[in-house]
Amino acid sequence: MKRFLFVAMAVLGLQTAACGGPMEEQEALQPQEGSEVTAMAVCTASCPGGTTVSCTGNHCEAVEGQAVMCDGQWKNCPPVVVGTVSFFCEASNSLLSCTGINAHTLQPLSSKVCGGVSCNGVDTYCPAFTDARECF
């Protein structure tokens, strides 16, 4: 009987030692990359082209640049659309153009700078009129 009691106490001692101490406060509060959240949460991921996707649920996971998942339902980033845009500059009698993500023309910047093009977040405006002409 004493041998059984000794073995049982040894096993209990090993189990207690294996449990470890309390988690440090910093560890408990710091989410790790690729970590999962279990509670009502909103997950958001940045997507290529400057857009974002998000969802709300009890179980949430975000993969930057790709998708979010809430309660088992994945929501993917939208496809990246590459386009070419052109704008005629009357002041210089030239054509501005660019190719890239989020390609669009720009509205007049002033009465003398009539517009331009924007690709990948880079704006290029036409030169300004140096005479009495204005944008129409």
Image: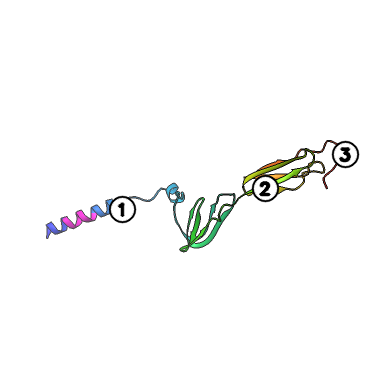
Q: Position of residue 100 (x, y in %)?
A: 61, 46
Residue 114 visible, this orientation = yes
Residue 121 visible, this orientation = no
Identified at 82% across, 43% down, the residue is 111
Q: What secondary structure prevails in the magenta region?
A: helix
Say which element carries label 3: loop
Name the quadrant of the N terminus: bottom left
Q: Nearer the viewer, residue 47 or 40?
A: 47
Q: Determine which residue is flagged by label 2.
A: 85
Q: Position of residue 35 (x, y in %)?
A: 44, 53
Say which element carries label 2: strand
Label 2 Cα neighbours within 10 Å, binned few <14 / some 14-19 / many ≥20: some
Q: Determine which residue is flagged by label 3.
A: 132
- Which residue is the extreme one toward the right? 132
Residue 19 - label: 1
Identified at 72% across, 45% down, the residue is 87
Q: Nearer the viewer, residue 89 or 122?
A: 89
Q: Position of residue 62 (x, y in %)?
A: 49, 54
Q: Amino acid at mark 1?
A: Cys
Judge whether 107 appears above or below 76 on screen.
above
Q: Amino acid at mark 2?
A: Val
Label 1 – label 2 distance at C-alpha: 63 Å
Q: Are marks 2 and 3 in contact (CB under 8 Å)?
A: no
Identified at 44% across, 56% down, the residue is 36
Q: Is residue 131 left or right of residue 71?
A: right
Image: magenta residue range: 7-12
Label 3 Cα neighbours within 10 Å, binned few <14 / some 14-19 / many ≥20: few
Q: Nearer the viewer, residue 44 or 112?
A: 112
Whichever of labels 2 and 3 marks the residue nearer the N terminus, that label is: 2
Label 1 – label 3 distance at C-alpha: 82 Å
